[in-house]
Image (cartoon, helix red, strand yellow):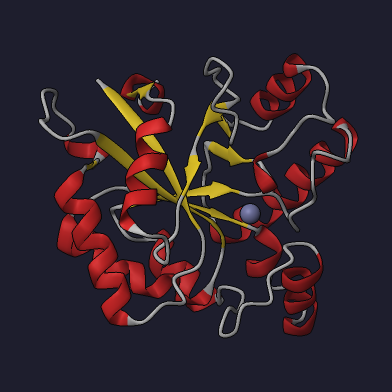
Amino acid sequence: MKIRVIALHDLVYSDRQLENFFDFLNSYFHLVNLKDFKSGYFKPCILLTADDGYDDWKKFIPIVEKYNFSLMLGVCTSFIDPLISYSKKTAILTENLHRSKRGVIPISVGTFQELSSHKNVIIADHSYDHIDFGSSDVSVLEAQIQKSQDVFNVYNINVNDFIFPFGQRHNVPHYHDIENILKEYGYTRGWGFYRRFPPRRFLLPRTGIDPSMPKIEIIARISRARAISVDWMHE
Ligand SMILES: [Zn+2]
């Protein structure tokens, strides 16, 4: 069975907009639950993921319960690092992530703990502070992963997935360098936005959409997305 993996970001939208968006996704697509995945769905299967770590992600809880899908959340671990200040976290949000949308704030520890303990949620590493691997090298990648691991250890969480910030990694020139580092730290999958290339274990493709897009655009993007075997999620 094939799935298409979709990337969202913040949920800073009105309740009505979010309700319309998820109702629409649920009516056109099968929202995959990895714990209960059979074959032969009539509708195209999509796995939902979201990147960065926003406090409005608490709105995901009633949504994943209503539709009962699996949700992978790629968190910038600096946002949940108990050792750094809130002002430093908001600086990372504006300077590294380039996010200045009104109402967008870093995920709180409370929201993170609520989400990470939910049965439908899979936590992924989205680097420590959203360094652009389009312009930094393999030693920077390793340092970021080490810092992320230190934070996940505080919460006693095991993480299998690494989501490249900005979906990019072209300054880490060799796929095998990425593979070796991620494997060494216990990851089993890596995610980018590279739909033109054949999927590889540490370079799986995703496609970005957001709730403010016209429905026709969302359908077009998802139909252009590269589908991957659901086996990648179970190996
Ligand atoms: Zn990101």
Q: Is residue 23 above or below residue 31?
A: below
- Residue 104 left/right relative to 30: right
Q: Quadrant of residue 59?
A: bottom left
Residue 207 x, y percent position in the rendering: 48, 40
Could you tell me which quadrant the N terminus lies in? top left
- Residue 63 left/right relative to 175: left
For image coordinates 40% across by 20% down, the residue present is 235
Residue 83 x, y percent position in the rendering: 76, 73
- Residue 216 left/right relative to 163: left
Residue 18 x, y percent position in the rendering: 31, 71
Specify the quarter for ligand 1: bottom right
Residue 187 x, y percent position in the rendering: 58, 31
Q: Quadrant of residue 22?
A: bottom left
Number of marks: 0
Q: State the residue in front, 109 or 62.
A: 62
For image coordinates 32% across by 24% down, the residue present is 230
For image coordinates 19% across by 52% down, the residue present is 26
